[in-house]
Image: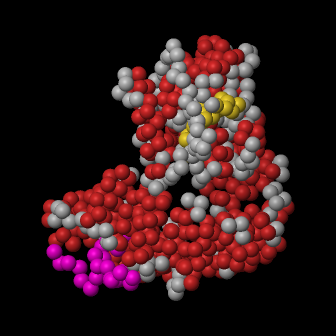
Amino acid sequence: MQDKIIEALRRNAADEGVTLAREWVAAEPQQAQAHRWLALALQQQGQLADAQASLEQALALAPDDAALHLQQAGLLLALRQIAAAGEALERSTTLNPNEFSAYLMQAHLALARDDADEADRLGRMAARVEPDNPELAGIQGMVALRRGDVDRALSVLSAASQQLPNDPRLLHALGFAYLGKDMLAFAEQAFRRVLELSPGTQALRGLLVQLALRQGHVDRAAEVMRDVLANEGGDSPGMRRLAGELELASGQPLQALEHLRPLLSQLPGDRATLQMLLVAWQRLGRDDEARTDLEAALQDNPQLHDLWLARLAVAPVGSDEAVDVVDRWLAAMPEHLPALEARMSLHDMKEQAEDAEATARRIVALEPGRASGEQRIVEALLVREPAAAVAHVQALLDSSPEDAHPALRTWLGSVQDRAGDPAAALATWLSLHEALAPTRLPLPPQAKAPGEWPALGTVAEDNATRPMFVWGAPGSGVERVVAVMAAGSRVLRGDRFGPTPPNDGFQNFFTLQRLATDALTPEQLVQQWREQLPSRGIEDGNVIDWLLWWDNALLWALRPQLPEGRLIIAIRDPRDMLVEWLALGAPAPLALTSSSEAAQWLARSLEQVAELHEQDLYAHLLLRTDDAVNDPAAMGALLEQAFGLRFPQVRSLGPGTIEAGHWRKYATVLAAEFSRLTPVAVRLGYPEV
């Protein structure tokens, strides 16, 4: 339905779009996206007040959906008229008939359709009419946001907001620019100001609750929620869901149930509600109540995927009860692929291998190439005919579109590995690295150790700041360490691997060169890093910073300028690290042209680690991940032993990787590479053979 509406709106057939959207709303009145697209169609039809009402309904159902709030920002900007402070936003009685207003309106409609290019074109047309009008910032800022240029969005909207400091529309858009930079406190401040100017904007309070929770301010979130539920119109299903989330975060599962249980009849297929209900029931030990409530909901809604998943979650894993639930799910939805996948998994748990394979073949008959089914078929072939398993994956690769080739080639290498053909696996992986090299980052440069290190600075007794850096060379499993640390810490930052990384010396591969030529001083390097922390949501300097790269030359700055810091380095047997890097890549997409190049670079990196450790050049900890890379519980225990803190259990550490000692299967085909790595492996405490 969504595609049909988009197609109609692109043809400027607004009446048809409204008709389609109303049909969707009638069929699924509790679906926020249906109301969202009705709002957009009404907006394009010129019915701004009705559009705003529909969007408010969508936000009532999903008050924490940032995309809906962003659409509301565009609608509010399109309205171009705000009632007196303290009153709700109202529709303009008339739009300015001049060309400028028309361009703005059309640009906002384009933004709502996610057509940033068209919005940009219209914004430039409007700029020809009134180039200095600050209302243009709403278009320019949101275009930049849609294109991922958050810095430009923030710059444009901040400047415009200074000209119109009491314009809720610009403040609304500015709040999302701050969100794009993960500057949660600033975003919250902007949205609170919008509410001061326009207290009737109830849905925005739901976003404020989420922002307070993300910053760890449960008390402030509770205060906002109390205000919402006390206000007329604030007690909506979406707000009740948020209230349940807040009670769970506060450790009050009973109160959470009071908010959430009524939503089973109002939002029976809502995934977030079901997940929170399951958590509350589990914490209270009310499995029977969960079964009763979910069964009642399924009686009225037997076609809801997430409702069946929730019911299955209450059944013990692999139990006869689970089998009964999945069989009833398949009876209600006989060609529903997730139900078939659940049945396939249960066959495997019951050691019914032939039935599991038969179900897998039924899955791929319904959807050829479906990963779950194809993988299970390959597993069966590996048991009885390994060469056929390799041929099966090769056939999938040969018939797949180009964009699927990298993942399939990685899998092909893994299957060749398991089929006992390391030479073929290595050739497959190397060919993939060679194909991807032009689109990847160059290997970070490596510096030679100086003749003498600068003195280690002293740490004042009253200094409560203890920043921590985390790094691991490719193949070390550092991303798995970070996954567990992130589950237990609000200050871990992995943004260096995201779309908006911090702009400091630790992010720049040219930093070593700049330090060596005095283009960048040690003081400047650390100061730049500190200055970036508030924009990354760190106010007091206590951060766990996952580094993109490491070189001991950074100690030229860290030893004197940040002696209170600590470095955590993930390692495993260097030869296993090389095989994993070749097989699965690394968190940072580094370019490789040969296994020899990879071994040389990895050896130099680990020689620096050995030197740092042997000479104790900086406060550090080596985390040996060899026996924990595929085991969430073991990884949690490893970190608990290292830090003396209990970490939450994570469900998965990501795709499986090679087991410790797997490198020995490659001792012949990678003999030269291993001869380069073995000396540093021994230095780090691993056996020579």
Q: Is residue 378 visible?
A: yes
Image quarter of the C terminus: top right
Between 300 and 88, the residue placed more toward the observer is 88
Left or right side of 194 for 246: right
Judge whether residue 666 can be spotted in this image. Answer: no
Q: Nearer the viewer, residue 260 or 114?
A: 260
Give the tally of numbered discs: 0
- Residue 254 horizontal/vertical position (percent): 74, 74
Res 96 quadrant in image: bottom left
Asked which quadrant contains residue 523, the reply is top left
Relative horizontal placement of residue 515, taking residue 347 as reference (left or right): left
Q: Is residue 89 magenta?
A: yes
Q: For the point 37% across and 65% down, which residue is it?
A: 173
- Compared to 407, does 350 lie above or below? below
The residue depicted at 53 percent of the width and 81 percent of the height is: 234
User: Residue 614 versus residue 466: which sits nearer the camera?
Assistant: 466
Task: Give the prevailing secondary structure in the magenta stretch.
Answer: loop
Residue at left 57%, top 69%?
A: 220
Q: Is residue 127 magenta?
A: no
Give x and y (percent) for residue 300.
Answer: 68, 79
Q: Which residues are magenta?
A: 71-98
Horizontal and vertical percent position of residue 24: 48, 76
